[in-house]
């Protein structure tokens, strides 16, 4: 009974270079990850929408002390503002808040979960 | 009008404890009971917090384990998990139950062991802590908890011009306060230069911008307002607010404002019939220096954007106009996750009684505790006052 955007559909799209989000008809909010109902107003049935793949860095940090399971250090994690919504992902190539970035792929963890990977535009 | 009263408070030293969770919790529980002049048999229910011992040391179903170890087998125990806001959530529910007359006297507390010395190493605990970020939409990026608060803090720096040196002032202040607290994990003062020269964990945070992994336990005894005066040193609880925010971070409306803290503070202040201007001091959730800056603004103790300058100007020092974290905070006192919320209540209780020793604040009549969980998606704010 899973109407609307699911994690599986979101992940499949990301692997194809497409970012999906959910748009709320009631309050006008758009979110960058699947939700069963609008997190801002509670309305059910967010409409799956294709998000822009380019935007600007909203905030970022470089992680020097990684969790177990990640061998590299000094990788950048960013929240990217796509205009209608924001998404979190990896950022390859140094960029600061306000810099233009674009989707450049995805990173995948040991369980097969994927998140977006951005590069400076 | 008090909702309930805290009549006993106890906590272990925060630091390294190579003992089972049950023994650690019992030390805090008996400290609270002794302080109240009560016995285990007087406790009608236990509201218990533990965040991650299932992951960290394969210990779950801890409620009856700690109750049985401390002479309270048989009573109902409810266990709370809300990341770093774990035992404040236990406290909130205990206050509600006692106020409603479900129980006359309850024990509230929490325990956690997080140090590499007694458990898993830094990389493993970093992964355990990261379980509070979204499994599908955040963890695959390698986001850590220093990273979570770095994301919030860097946006705050961008919006308001907050500087790394201002953040360092938070660390220096809280280390200084911790040096006066015999139960603090870190008991030494540090300098701005030492903080700014430390290795980067997740920029802008360097090592001394971050709280430590700690072992410890804390507990308080909560009773109804109608019986509080039969105890030696009751302190009133006049408001407890609790709110959540959207997860993951990217879907929050404005991540760095920590909206849950603002909503919880509004609720707590309204219950207490006070405003931020009436607060004499605060214990806030400074898991990272930037988190204290965000909290000081969310609680209304300083204006938005003024958290950094206020710390640098000494306004939040023990002799400032709005003292924050006289205990040393998570930064210096330590942060055994499930014990932190009620440890803040312990500090409020001791300060409001005038029993805080070398770190005692003058004229402390009303205080606020701010305990945050996860990526600021849970916050519990509690107002306590000298009994009127």
Image (cartoon, coloured by chain):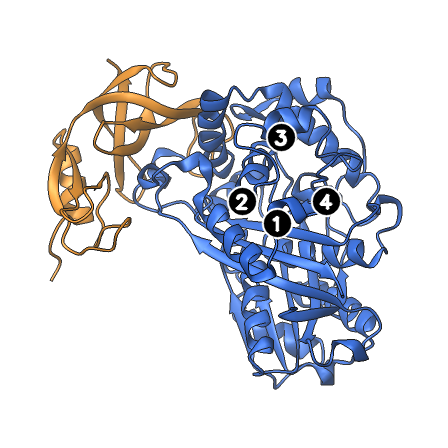
Same chain, labels 3 and 1: yes
Same chain, labels 2 and 3: yes
Q: Which numbered dot is residue B345?
A: none
Q: Find numbered disc 3 in the image and state the secondary structure of the residue it sits on.
A: helix
A69 is higher (above) or lower (below) than B5: above
Q: CA distance from mark 2 to mark 1?
A: 7 Å
CB within 8 Å, label 2 to label 1: yes
Residue topped by disc 4 = B333
Mark with earlier residue (4, 2): 2
Q: Find numbered disc 2 in the image and state the secondary structure of the residue it sits on.
A: helix
Q: Disc 1: which chain?
A: B
Q: CA distance from mark 2 to mark 3?
A: 18 Å
Mark with earlier residue (3, 1): 1
Q: Disc 2: which chain?
A: B
**Chain B drawn colour:** blue
Q: Which numbered dot is residue B125?
A: 2
Write the residue at 66% across / 64% down. B237
Mark with earlier residue (4, 3): 3
Residue topped by disc 3 = B209
Write the residue at 67% across / 39% down. B331
Q: CA distance from mark 4 to mark 1?
A: 14 Å
**Chain A drawn colour:** orange
């Amino acid at each position: 009974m899973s109407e609307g955007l699911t994690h599986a559909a979101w992940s499949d799209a990301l692997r194809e270079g497409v970012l999906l989000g959910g748009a709320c008809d009631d309050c006008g909010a758009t979110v960058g990850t699947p939700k069963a109902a609008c997190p801002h107003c509670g309305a059910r049935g967010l409409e799956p929408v294709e998000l822009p793949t380019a935007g600007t860095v909203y905030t970022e940090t470089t992680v020097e002390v990684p969790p177990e399971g990640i061998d590299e250090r000094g990788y950048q994690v960013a929240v990217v503002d796509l205009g209608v919504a924001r998404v979190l992902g990896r950022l390859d190539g140094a960029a600061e808040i306000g810099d233009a970035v674009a989707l450049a792929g995805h990173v995948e963890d040991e369980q097969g979960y994927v998140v977006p990977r951005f590069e400076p535009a | 009008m008090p909702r309930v009263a805290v009549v006993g408070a106890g906590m272990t030293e925060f630091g390294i404890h190579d003992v089972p969770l049950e023994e650690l919790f019992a030390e805090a529980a008996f400290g609270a009971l002794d302080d109240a002049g009560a016995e285990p048999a007087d406790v009608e229910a236990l509201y218990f917090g533990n965040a991650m011992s299932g992951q960290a040391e394969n210990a779950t179903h801890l409620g009856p384990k700690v109750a049985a170890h401390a002479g309270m087998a048989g009573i109902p125990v409810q266990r709370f998990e809300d990341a770093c806001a774990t035992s404040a959530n236990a406290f909130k529910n205990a206050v509600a139950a006692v106020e409603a007359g479900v129980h006359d006297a309850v024990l509230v507390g929490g325990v956690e062991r997080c140090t590499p010395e007694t458990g898993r190493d830094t990389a493993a605990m970093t992964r355990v802590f990261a379980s509070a970020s979204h499994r599908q939409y955040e963890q695959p990026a390698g986001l850590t908890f220093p990273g979570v608060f770095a994301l919030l803090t860097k946006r705050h720096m961008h919006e308001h011009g907050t500087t790394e040196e201002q953040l360092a002032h938070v660390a220096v202040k809280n280390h200084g306060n911790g040096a006066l607290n015999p139960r603090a994990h870190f008991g030494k003062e540090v300098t701005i230069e030492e903080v700014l020269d430390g290795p980067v964990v997740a920029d802008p945070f360097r090592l001394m911008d971050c709280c430590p992994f700690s072992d410890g336990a804390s507990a308080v005894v909560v009773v109804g307002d109608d019986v509080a005066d039969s105890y030696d040193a009751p302190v009133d609880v006049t408001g407890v607010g609790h709110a959540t925010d959207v997860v993951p971070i990217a879907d929050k409306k404005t991540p760095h404002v920590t909206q849950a803290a603002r909503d919880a503070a509004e609720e707590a202040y309204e219950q207490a019939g006070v405003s931020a201007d009436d607060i004499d001091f605060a214990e806030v959730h400074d898991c990272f220096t930037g988190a204290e800056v965000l909290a000081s603004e969310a609680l209304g103790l300083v204006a938005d954007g003024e958290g950094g300058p206020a710390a640098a100007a000494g306004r939040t020092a023990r002799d400032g106009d709005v003292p924050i974290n006289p205990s040393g905070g998570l930064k210096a006192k330590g942060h055994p996750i499930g014990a932190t919320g009620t440890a803040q209540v312990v500090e409020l209780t001791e300060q409001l009684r005038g029993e805080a020793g070398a770190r005692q604040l003058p004229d402390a009549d009303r205080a606020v505790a701010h305990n945050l969980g996860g990526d600021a998606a849970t916050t519990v704010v509690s107002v306590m006052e000298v009994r009127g």
